[in-house]
Image (spheres, helix red, strand yellow):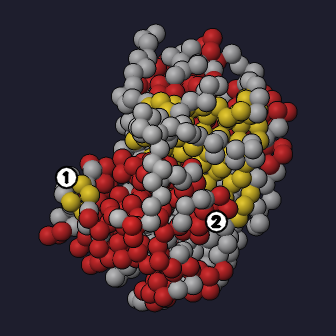
Amino acid sequence: MPAIHLTTTKTPAQSSCGMVTANHPLGAAAGAEMLAAGGNAVDAAVATLLALTVVEPMMVGIFGGGLAHLRLPDGRHEVIDGLSSAGGGSHDQMYQPISDAPAQYMQARDRQNDLGRSAVAVPGSLQAWSLMHVRHGVLPFADLVQPAIRYARRGFAVTPYLAGAVQEAQNDLRRDPEISKLFLPDDAPIQVGARLVQADYATTLERIAAEGPEALTHGTLGDEVITALAQGPVSAARLSKDDLAQYTPQILQPIHGTYRGFDIYGPPPPASSGVHVTQMLNMVEPFDLSTMGFDSAKRADLLARVIRQAFVDRNRHSGDPNFVDIPVGRLTSKDYAAQCVAHMVQDGLAAHPFSAAKESADTTHITIADADGLIVTATFTINALFGARFMVPGTGIIPNNYMSNFDPHPGRALSVAAGKRVPTSMAPMIVARDGHPVLALGQPGGLRIFPSVFQTLVNYIDHKMPLQRAIEAPRLWTQGQELELEPGYGPLTDALVDMGHEVKAVPHIGGGLNAIEFHSDGTMTGAACWRADGTVFGMGGGLAEAGVRFWPDRAPDTNTADASDT
């Protein structure tokens, strides 16, 4: 069988004083700036995420949602859940579904749950970043906003990644004059290398720097957004100022699993990752994957079946645990994994019911650590490319379209309900061993996130790949229909077809993963993969040792004469 060539395209970075990885160079630079200014990993994370709202406006914004997973220097973990939620006026009959057929099941009439003002859920991003800073940051919040203000006010060069997103979304963007004048100058998509200046958004960020995040949740900025959301035909519940003011991020404990002597930590529901990454690792633990080899069709077949089984259980048990009962203990147990393996062998590749789950693949992720042992791995989004695909006039804010992740049919587990948080596949994960951190990682990519992170962990732990190779290695993915293969898996295509898989070649699966590896000598390695504009900044060196003087051969100045004597 032809071998798979495991090449890498990017270079990792080494550091002893701190590491910042993000899916845009300027985002990573903002975080590094905070570390250089004496901030910690939380300060760097908030500054990076705010900067990404400027340079990755198609992916993330202050009117979006997401998750941050922290490991504190004393070894404690906490997950800050800033996921968006349905507004107080929402209900399960606010949309009219157009079909029960799988391809159109999550769509509503006139795209009301997907496009425009009726698609916007209560945001959690800015509130989550603020809470993270209040609990653990050391620099003034206003300092953390400065890189983002600078990038918005002075502009930056458009990357092919951003230009491609504009190209893809241009027909919807053209519907809104406010957003189109920024991204479709002269009615054509902005070009690679063009300088993108966001003056209105710079002013918004300046207001947040001056007033704090309360400018959005309790101030006049929030009033302006709510007024804009109320415009146009009112055909679905709209957000109110109370929705903004009453939203509270949740502080949760992670799911904990074990795999070959490693401790695996991931977010709890409504995120799927902590539960199902643990489940999948439990399922493959009895198999000697290292002996199979990465280029083994038998190994690829096993991973595909395990991912399929995880989606069977995710489809049965997914949602906001405040509304849906999720048997976390059973799903993450070793005994249940053994039952799944036995069932998987019996059933072979039997078809499973289609998944109604819908998640946008358009997200961003950061992984950051400082020299004192504080780690932040965080995934945030405005859901689809450019969210609801309009801009609040005069603010530069692009709202999310998170309502599209709810089932538009009434009476279902994922149906709309006031206050319900959206389900997510986000997987900001942390791995430890013997009480010490080993790896922190995560990525964008919607439903493909947690199976991709699972494969990266297998690459790193079972195949003992260096970090850069582990995150850039080819991926596969399935929900139970076609088996998607990245180009690197091409040599295994025929063998997998012979095993019964319907194979579909795709250019990439999920988005750009970034990660930090922690070494026993206190150093760390940061890496970002080829699937996004991922960039790594590592800090070495540091301040002078105590007692060091610039001119040790010069006697101390003992002149204490008063200035009036000279």
Residue 193's mark?
Answer: 1
Q: Is residue 435 above or below residue 95?
A: above
Query: Could one spot residue 461 in this view of the protein?
Result: yes
Amino acid at dot 2: Val
What amino acid is labelled 1 in the image?
A: Gly
In front of the other: 550 or 196: 550
Q: Secondary structure at mark 1?
A: loop
Which residue appears at 82% of the width and 51% of the height?
327
Q: How many marks?
A: 2
Circle 2: is it few (<14), some (14-19), or many (20+) Cα within 10 Å? few
Task: Give the residue displayed 23% in from the left and 73% down from the top.
Answer: 181
| Element marked by disc 2 | helix
Residue 118 in the image: state x and y as whole percent: 49, 79
Residue 125 higher or lower than 513, as above or below: below
The quadrant where residue 348 appears? top right
Q: Residue furthest left?
A: 186
Location of residue 395 with respect to 59 vertically, above or below:
below
x and y, in percent, of residue 154 in the image: 26, 65
Residue beneath disc 2: 134
Q: Position of residue 230 (x, y in %)?
A: 47, 89
